[in-house]
Image: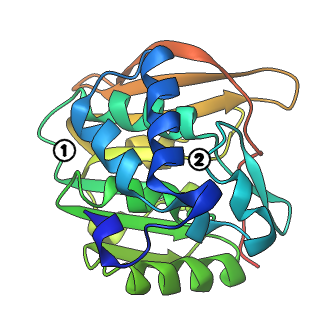
Amino acid sequence: MIASSGHSGIGMTSQRTRDRLIDRLKEQGIHNPAVLSVMRSTPRHLFIEEALAHRAYEDTALPIGLGQTISQPYIVARMTEALLETSPMEKVLEVGTGSGYQAAVLAPLVKRVYTVERIKALQKQAASRFRSLRLRNIRAYHRDGGMGLPEHAPFDGIIVTAAPEGIPKALVSQLRIGGVIIMPIGDKDEQILIKVTRTQEGYDKEFLERVIFVPLLGGIS
């Protein structure tokens, strides 16, 4: 597990503090033992600013600069668990690398993770974290996430960590038949987390729960 590489933390970032977070996730309905195990071992405090490290294992979103956030641990666990309900899940695309935390959680659970981030500074920082944690099955790109990574398609699954107003057809087209996207959709006033499954005829959509994410923006910076 990741925590064995010297990143276990002390005090408010200790294993005991992480275990309390896992207890809260279980109480909120996260049951997949592999997801819980990875969440327990992944050092979330390394994905945020040092000044906020003492809050790393609170079940809350935190700012990471440039108008972006690291998602609430429950949401990371919920999206990961929903993704893994469909198998096999070997090749996964993440849209919106951000801090890199969601990709780091995915890395021990799937064979290959491709992650795209439109903000170069965040992409470089996340890639550095992946190297530090020896997460060698993650490939990080500086791209407009809404366009996906067509050169590496088809994907078994896609996780989108920012909210478009509708389902991006470009991403659906990069799924294999039977593949799924876990993503929020909506505007700043109302968003829902959905599961989109690609079918021969198009796609099916399943409502999961109400959420709040930053909007999915186009272009790169």
10 Å crowding of disc 2: few (<14), some (14-19), many (20+): many
Question: In the rendered view, would you say 69 is above or below 53?
Answer: above
Asked if one can make out residue 166 in the rendered structure from this viewpoint, the answer is: no
State the residue in front, 151 or 10: 10
Front residue of 75/59: it is: 59
Please, is residue 107 above or below residue 181 in the view?
Answer: below
Distance from label 1 to label 2 (Cα)? 18 Å
Q: What's the amino acid at mark 1?
A: Met
Give the secondary structure at mark 2.
loop
Q: Is 59 situated left or right of 134 in this image?
A: right
In the rendered structure, are the residues bearing label 1 and label 2 in contact, judged by CB atoms less than 8 Å apart? no
Q: Type of residue at label 2? A: Thr
Q: Looking at the image, is 107 positioned above or below residue 159?
A: below
Relative depth, front residue between 27 and 221: 27
Q: Which residue is mark 1?
A: 89
Q: Residues within 10 Å of mark 1 (few under 14, many from 20)?
A: some
Tell me the SS state at disc 1.
loop
Residue under label 2: 161
Q: Quadrant of the C terminus?
A: bottom right
